[in-house]
Image (spheres, rainbow, N blue to C red):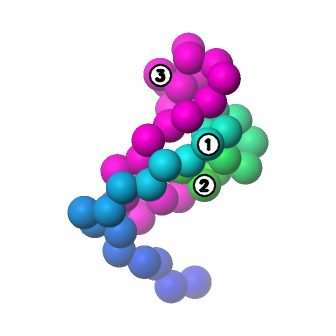
Amino acid sequence: MTQIDLSGKTAFVTGSTRGIGLAIARSLYGAGAKVAVVGRDLERARTV
């Protein structure tokens, strides 16, 4: 699979403290993006 370079980009991912949102946030971060983590559980958001 081709990896996209997202360096210098910012992603806003809702529901990113668990499940699919978490997987997407991690993937975007792995591609170089800065990721804004948004979710209902503040403690989980801090650990992402």
In the rendered image, residue 38, in percent from the top left (x then y), is placed at 55, 34
Where is mark 3, residue-wise? 46
In the rendered image, residue 36, in percent from the top left (x then y), is placed at 44, 41
The amino acid marked with disc number 1 is: Thr
Q: Is residue 32 left or right of residue 15?
A: left
Q: Which mark is residue 24?
A: 2
Say above or below: 17 vs 7. Answer: above
Where is mark 1, residue-wise? 14
Towards the viewer: 28 or 40: 40
* Mark 3, secondary structure of its residue: helix
In the rendered image, residue 4, in percent from the top left (x then y), is placed at 43, 78
Whether the magenta-drawn stretch holds residue 16 is answered as: no
Whether the magenta-drawn stretch holds residue 31 is answered as: yes
Estimate the spatial distance between the alpha carbons at disc 3 and disc 1, rounded to whole Å.
14 Å
Q: Are there few (<14), some (14-19), or many (20+) residues within 10 Å of tag 2?
A: some
Q: Which residues are magenta?
A: 26-48
